[in-house]
Image (tube, rainbow, N blue to C red):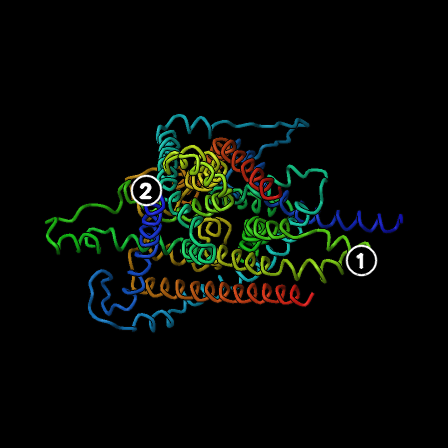
């Protein structure tokens, strides 16, 4: 008996321990290092920041250098970038929800035999390259691109409309790229609704619209929160879309961070930007985690 | 049922929105002209040019290698963490573990990329390992976010699965590893395959994290594509895009078709058993 318990114990320890150690080292520890480097100053050395601990004349000095954070408050560019990123993420999440909800609803109410194929059609684009799907819009939106050429050819406009490198292009690209991530959790939620509830309401004389707003919508709250977080959080830090479609018209924090790191080579300012971004996103991430847990509990019942 | 027809309309309109740009991209990959937006007749000449481009071809090879390796390790870790989350009711640090395994799903790429790079730099400074950044560091980064996705896919299958079969086998004296290989693995196999494919495509697709953690000489395909796209639209990228879209569609529909056939056979077998009884 004892031996088998011991074996079971060591087995479970390995099963938990291996992924646990991996995540602690390669997911959690990096954040601690980001926090540490954000408290350093950039310097001309390898690596390009000052040390936190200094040992001289038997004195150990621990230096928390806040200059990177002070720097961020001195230039309004950074504050504007955060506000703008949150604004863009918020509105594009809203648009995704408004387009994605009816789509998810249509799939969930389709004949059961068709549902897997329809869901597959929605998800398929997200498995092809993200970069290339954004790239496709460049050719469409350019001044001499297909949309402008077409509109000029049929005579609606005489001069091309500037679409690429505008906020409009950024919103379009985000909604295009993130729509499938909104639809998947919404569908998973809507498909589980008890149909007899809706029939009962209908038998008692409720109109279709009332049934939708009073029953379906409240029941789908978990799916809406999960889908919205799945769009909102990554979009706040989005780099590729503002870079390729936004040009200089839209300042987003992911792009600012990238430029600080790759162009200005200021590692500690980049780390400070990342630390603040994590602080902003920690509540949405916890919300996402909680609603995922809730969905799993629902499934288990 | 006005509600229903509205949602159906939105569904087809949404699908059109999702597919039209890709469709146009595929058509223009057969364009003769160097100017991407001017149509100059059908041609497959850019397909030939792409295969001659040794820089892109070696990036393709490198990306496939990294994707293969990181998908495999991500699925291995994903199986372990799914088992931990679903089958082990309680262990120390389960809440922390659950948080760490879901956070990579939503964490912005720039943060994961920057933080991992700073970790690697700190490691090199302290221990001399990794001596240089490249394939190894990309593999570590891709394994880390790939395992989060693999865990979602595999654990949802494991949760549906009845634990009593495993328990019965254990009670009859089968050692845990044998139970896993003889019972659990065959039952979760479809989820393991889809988790592997998902981790593979995610790795093949990542540009931001790879840009941070890579070093000189290890340029993956998306990094190559990004730098080419920054210079403007190019016919070769159109061809590459079309080939990727084609490959992904083929694999997806094959997997879908095979799994549907398997499911039908399984249901038929179950119905037959029922009749015999």
Same subunit, tags 2 and 1? no
Where is residue B56? Give x, y as percent: 40, 65
Task: For residue A270, say whether it is visible.
Answer: no
The answer to which image quadrant residue A204 occupies is top left
Task: For residue B149, say whether it is visible.
Answer: yes
Callout 1: chain: B
In-front residue for pair B195/A217: A217
Where is residue A32? Give x, y as percent: 58, 36
Secondary structure of residue under mark 2: helix
In-front residue for pair A88/B190: B190
Whether residue A132 is situated above or below residue A89 in the rendered picture: below
| Label of residue B214 in the image | none
Disc 2 to disc 1: CB gap under 8 Å: no
Where is residue B177? Give x, y as percent: 75, 58
Camera-side mark, 2 or 1: 1
In-front residue for pair B67/A68: B67
Callout 2: chain: A
Secondary structure of residue under mark 1: loop
Q: Residue at x 20, y 65 (%)?
A: B39
Q: How many marks?
A: 2
Residue wearing tag 2: A171
The answer to which image quadrant residue A291 occupies is top right
Where is residue B24? Give x, y as percent: 28, 60
Question: Label 1 neighbourhood size at 10 Å, few (<14), some (14-19), many (20+)?
Answer: some
- Quadrant of the snapshot with the C terminus of chain A: top right
Question: Label 2 neighbourhood size at 10 Å, few (<14), some (14-19), many (20+)?
Answer: many
Q: CA distance from mark 2 to mark 1?
A: 55 Å
Residue wearing tag 1: B175
């Amino acid at each position: 008996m004892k031996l088998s318990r011991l074996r079971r114990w060591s087995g479970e320890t390995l099963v938990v321990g291996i992924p646990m150690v991996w995540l602690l080292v390669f997911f959690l520890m990096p954040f601690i290092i980001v926090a540490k480097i954000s408290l350093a100053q950039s310097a001309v050395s390898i690596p390009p920041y000052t040390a936190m601990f200094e040992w001289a004349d038997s004195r150990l000095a621990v230096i928390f250098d806040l200059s990177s954070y002070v720097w961020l408050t001195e230039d309004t560019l950074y504050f504007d970038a955060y506000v703008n990123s949150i604004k863009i993420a918020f509105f594009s999440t809203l648009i995704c929800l408004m387009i994605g909800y009816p789509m998810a609803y249509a799939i969930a109410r389709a004949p059961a035999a068709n549902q897997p194929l329809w869901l597959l059609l929605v998800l398929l684009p997200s498995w092809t390259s993200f970069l290339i799907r954004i790239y496709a819009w460049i050719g469409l939106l350019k001044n001499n691109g297909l949309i402008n050429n077409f509109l000029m050819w049929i005579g609606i406009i005489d001069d091309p409309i500037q679409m690429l490198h505008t906020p409009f292009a950024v919103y379009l690209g985000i909604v295009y790229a993130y729509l499938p991530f909104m639809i998947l959790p919404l569908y998973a939620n809507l498909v589980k609704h008890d149909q007899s509830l809706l029939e009962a309401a209908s038998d008692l004389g409720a109109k279709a619209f009332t049934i939708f707003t009073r029953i379906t919508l409240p029941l789908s709250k978990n799916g809406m929160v999960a889908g919205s977080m799945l769009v909102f959080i990554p979009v706040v830090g989005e780099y590729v879309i503002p870079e390729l479609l936004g040009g200089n018209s839209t300042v987003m924090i992911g792009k600012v961070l990238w430029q600080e790191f790759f162009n200005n080579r200021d590692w500690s300012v980049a780390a400070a930007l990342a630390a603040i971004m994590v602080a902003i996103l920690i509540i949405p991430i916890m919300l996402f985690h909680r609603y995922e847990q809730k969905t799993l509990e629902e499934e288990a019942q | 049922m006005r509600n229903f027809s509205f949602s159906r309309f939105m569904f087809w309109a949404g699908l059109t929105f999702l597919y039209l740009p890709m469709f146009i991209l595929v058509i223009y990959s057969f364009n003769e002209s160097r100017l991407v937006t001017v149509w100059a007749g059908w041609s497959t000449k850019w397909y030939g040019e792409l295969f001659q481009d040794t820089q892109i071809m070696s990036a393709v090879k490198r990306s496939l290698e990294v994707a293969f390796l990181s998908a495999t390790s991500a699925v291995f870790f994903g199986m372990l963490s799914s088992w931990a989350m679903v089958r082990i009711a309680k262990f120390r640090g389960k809440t922390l573990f659950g948080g760490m395994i879901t956070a990579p799903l939503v964490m912005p790429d720039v943060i994961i990329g920057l933080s991992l790079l700073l970790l690697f730099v700190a490691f090199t400074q302290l221990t001399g390992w990794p001596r240089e950044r490249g394939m190894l560091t990309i593999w570590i980064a891709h394994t880390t976010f790939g395992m989060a996705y693999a865990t979602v896919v595999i654990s949802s299958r494991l949760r549906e699965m009845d634990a009593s079969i495993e328990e019965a086998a254990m009670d009859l004296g089968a050692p845990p590893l044998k139970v896993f290989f003889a019972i659990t693995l065959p039952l979760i196999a479809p989820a393991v395959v889809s988790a592997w494919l998902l981790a593979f495509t995610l790795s093949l697709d990542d540009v931001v994290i790879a840009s941070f953690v890579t070093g000189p000489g290890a340029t993956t395909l998306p990094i190559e594509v990004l730098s080419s796209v920054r210079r403007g639209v190019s016919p070769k990228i159109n061809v590459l895009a079309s080939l990727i879209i084609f490959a992904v569609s083929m694999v997806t529909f094959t997997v879908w078709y095979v799994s549907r056939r398997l499911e039908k056979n399984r249901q038929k077998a179950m119905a037959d058993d029922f009749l015999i009884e």
